[in-house]
Image: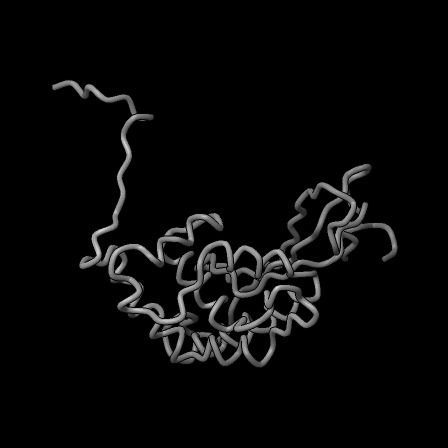
């Protein structure tokens, strides 16, 4: 058997208004609601001074981005998966990808730290509701490692010349549970962290 179409000529689209392509998102987003994701975002993420109302309804936008990522979206345009088929019948408050992109582009390093605070609170609630960190009350081996990510452009907040000469980087120390390889904490910091031999 031979395929007559080249891969570039083949495409698939899911637009039937009566079908749901990502029904598995329902229990995922219910768990997120039960763990208080929207409440944490509303309490901690404040995008004051953002133009065009980009900072409004941060809770709905963050949960939409999380839902899109859970459905496999890895770019702003891919977040349109939340509006395909009958998805709007399952979820309310879905924003367009362009709205979510405008929201993300207003973030500064300080706003990212606010979102990290949401992450810490949400991880604790998630661990309380699910067996995410079994045996967390017992002895655990934690591997703390520093990751450096090269950045381009002088306006990137939190980036510095640090460990790598002539290269601007951002550093993200992360804590991994040794057995499960589960990232329990990760946060972007300025490049000059403790693994740098120069004073910070």
For this view, does 191 lie left or right of residue 102? right
For this view, does 179 lie left or right of residue 92? right
Residue 195 appears in the rendering: no
Q: Residue at x 81, y 38 (%)?
A: 165
Q: Is residue 9 above or below residue 41?
A: above
The quadrant of the image that shows the C terminus is: bottom right
In the rendered image, residue 90, in percent from the top left (x then y), is placed at: 28, 69
Q: Is residue 172 above or below residue 154?
A: below
In the rendered image, residue 24, in percent from the top left (x then y), is placed at: 27, 62
- In this view, the residue in front, 92 or 38, is 92
Q: Residue at x 31, y 65 (%)?
A: 88
Q: How many marks?
A: 0
The quadrant of the image that shows the N terminus is: top left
Q: Is residue 130 above or below residue 6?
A: below
- In this view, the residue in front, 55 or 142, is 55
In the rendered image, residue 159, in percent from the top left (x then y), is placed at: 75, 51
Q: Residue at x 45, y 48 (%)?
A: 77
Q: Residue furthest right?
A: 199
Q: Is residue 157 above or below residue 91?
A: above
For this view, does 86 lie left or right of residue 61? left
Q: Residue furthest front?
A: 52
Task: Check the image and tell me how it is coloured.
Answer: one colour
- In this view, the residue in front, 12 or 159, is 12
Q: Residue at x 18, y 59 (%)?
A: 18
In the rendered image, residue 67, in percent from the top left (x then y), is placed at: 40, 62
Residue 101 appears in the rendering: yes
- In this view, the residue in front, 64 or 133, is 64
């Amino acid at each position: 058997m031979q395929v007559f179409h080249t891969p570039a000529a083949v495409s698939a689209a899911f637009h039937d208004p009566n079908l749901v392509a990502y029904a598995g998102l329902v229990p995922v987003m219910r768990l997120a609601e039960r763990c208080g994701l929207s409440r944490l975002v509303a309490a901690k993420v404040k995008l004051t001074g953002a133009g065009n109302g980009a900072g409004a309804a941060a809770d709905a936008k963050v949960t939409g981005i999380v839902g899109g990522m859970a459905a496999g979206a890895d770019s702003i345009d891919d977040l349109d998966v939340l509006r395909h088929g009958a998805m709007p019948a399952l979820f309310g408050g879905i924003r367009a990808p362009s709205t979510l992109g405008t929201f993300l582009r207003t973030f500064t390093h300080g706003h990212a730290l606010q979102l990290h605070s949401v992450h810490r609170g949400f991880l604790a609630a998630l661990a309380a509701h699910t067996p995410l960190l079994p045996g967390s009350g017992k002895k655990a081996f934690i591997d703390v490692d520093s990751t450096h990510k090269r950045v381009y452009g002088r306006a990137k907040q939190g980036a510095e010349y640090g460990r790598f000469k002539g290269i601007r980087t951002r550093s993200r120390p992360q804590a991994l549970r040794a057995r499960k390889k589960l990232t329990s904490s990760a946060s972007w910091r300025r490049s000059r962290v403790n693994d740098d031999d120069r004073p910070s």
